[in-house]
Amino acid sequence: DNAPGWWRSAVIYQVYPRSFRDLNGDGIGDLAGITAELPQLAELDVDAVWLSPFYTSPQRDAGYDVSDYCDVDPIFGTLGDFDVMIAEANRLGLRVIVDLVPNHCSDQHVAFQAALASPAGSPERDMFIFRDGTGPEGHEPPNNWQSHFGGPAWTRVAGPDGQPDQWYLHLFDSSQPDFNWDNPAVHAEFERVLRFWLDRGVSGFRVDVAHALVKAPGLPAWGGRADGGSSDGFPGHEAPMFGQPALHDIFRAWRLILDGYGPDRILCAEANVDPLPRLADWVRSDEMHQAFNFPYLHAGLDVYRMRSVITDSLTALDAVGAPSTWVLSNHDVVRHSSRFGYNGPGPRDGDGIGAADPQPDAALGRRRAAAASLFMLGLPGAAYLYQGEELGLPDGIDIPEHLRQDPTFARTGGARLGRDGCRVPLPWRSTERHLGFGSGQDPWLPLPASFADLARDAQAASPSSHLSLYRNMLALRRELGLGRGSLAWAEDWCSVSSLAYLNGDTLVLMNLNHEPLEMPAGSVLVRSAGSGSGSDSGSDSGSDSGSDSGSDSDATRFLA
Ligand code: TEU
Ligand code: CA
């Protein structure tokens, strides 16, 4: 699909490189592994893949700590492997989107090493956010901001003379110094990075913590949760480290660069913000094309919240001429198949699920995940899938402490388990060593025993599997043009435990009640109940087709 607007209705599949497929057998996924399995993604019929970072990195935050933005980390392969992957993707009609991490780099990046070796006030330090400490002898951090991963957002360095010196800001791990976006040299550097990857054929960028690049002048103390969070877990929209007006100039400059490569190159903001109008702020015809819809992810299965998020998203984004995006899982949150296995509040973002925690009901979670995914894939707009959700994978629960890699775990002294559970490698072939993830060393995180039944080959062979549901739904989505459709709530089918909308003459329904809802005979095109595991209770999804357009009872229907 070469149309400039391809992204408006696209299904974009997130590949987490270290966990996708390990072709050289060192226990970590690699670019050659992605190339080898791209045909599987083409067959699933997604439009594009988005790759989480594979750049040179000490891997303190799984590659979101970049030390060279224009090269491939040796654990993932080489630039040559990247070129081969792009060529194979193009051959298969798949686009490739890469991750841009402009808020911070690795403390091993040459620019940060140069800053450490240079005195306070030097141009080298001005690439980052260095400040003098407060209190006696500057022993206290410059302000009260907290890192997302726990602990203060400031770390003190030793000066070139070895004496205690300034502090630098890091909204994430101490190994991830924040860039100073008030400095034009930082702008120039990232414009170079954009061109580098556009020249290699990428279709665009997912922009990591896009809303955080610019900090409020003077770095004022933040009275709310110091990591910018509000009580319900969303970063507060008035936080001084988010949503600053100067962001618009940055995004406009980037958009000009992308447009120079053609109207089909896109920018998607990863901006974990609320409320929704704030999200639409970054999506403009001369700025970002898209932004992740985190309010939708955070609505869980609360039908009232889902309904208002959907309505508000469509309204807010319609006003700026953009479609919404929809997302249920990514590499930062407990997979929806596990989240939905709880009645009542499940784990908070970043907390993970451990063996000692209350356990989700796996079968219930998978059924509800099937229903919720089907419901999401019927919505107009773009959908982002996270690798493994098409298999209904749950989080890994039994991860030994010494294997946990997410800095959240260490920075909170184990109080929060972090995000490793959703990053467990994928099962490809049920009878092979390491379930086909790799044939050599142990995978960097163990695959749970339950993954054997969920392996891709086993599911591909079963018409009632979770994977088959995704395939069927994605095929219908394309055939019926649902991504480019529009939404009207189907009030007759909405209740305290069900939510339904019409997209054209297709009715999409999610039923969270134990009792199935009766649909007109012969009208269901796809339903999730009965896919995967048993279907005694919980939720149910399916779809129906009517012959004529027109009356509601003849509408095409999906049940979830
Ligand atoms: O995440 C940004 C972000 O806002 C996260 O704090 C997210 O809300 C949180 O992890 C949920 O627990 C991005 C990347 O997706 C993440 O993997 C990186 O660790 C982070 O940026 C720093 O680069
Ligand atoms: Ca490997």
Image (spheres, rainbow, N blue to C red):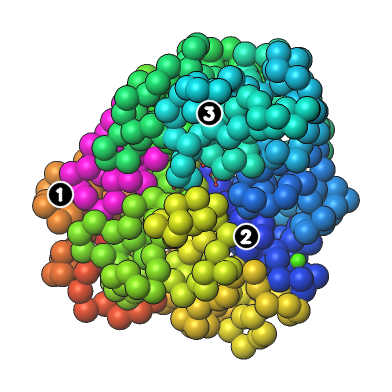
Q: At numbered mark 2, what does the secondary structure look like: helix, strand or loop? A: helix
Q: Say if 323 sits above or below 524 in the image.
A: above
Is residue 537 rendered to the left or right of residue 30? left
Whether pointer 2 and pointer 3 mark residues with C-beta atoms closer than 8 Å, the reply is no
Query: Dot 1, crowdedness within 10 Å: few (<14), some or many (≥20)?
Result: some
The magenta region covers 294-318
Q: Earlier in the sequence, mark 1 or mark 2?
A: 2
- For residue 518, say whether it is visible: yes
* Image spot of residue 505 (x, y percent): 30, 46
Q: Ligand 2, what quadrant?
A: bottom right
Q: At numbered mark 1, what does the secondary structure look like: helix, strand or loop? A: loop
Nearer-the-camera pick, 208 or 130? 130
Question: Is the distance from the Cβ of mark 2 to the nearest ligand 2 atom less than 8 Å?
Answer: no
The circle on residue 41 is 2
Q: CA distance from mark 1 to mark 2?
A: 34 Å
**Magenta span contains residue 374:** no
Q: Earlier in the sequence, mark 3 or mark 1?
A: 3
Q: At numbered mark 3, what does the secondary structure look like: helix, strand or loop? A: loop
Q: Amino acid at mark 1?
A: Cys
Nearer mark to the viewer, of 2 and 3: 3
- For residue 542, say whether it is visible: no
Q: Which residue is mark 1?
A: 494
**Residue depicted at 52% across the width and 73% down the height:** 400
**Residue depicted at 78% across the width and 27% down the height:** 161
Q: Amino acid at mark 3?
A: His
Query: Dot 3, crowdedness within 10 Å: few (<14), some or many (≥20)?
Result: some
Q: Earlier in the sequence, mark 2 or mark 3?
A: 2
**Residue depicted at 62% across the width and 80% down the height:** 435
Q: Which residue is mark 3?
A: 139
Please identify the quadrant where the N terminus is shown. Answer: top right
Res 224 → quadrant: top left
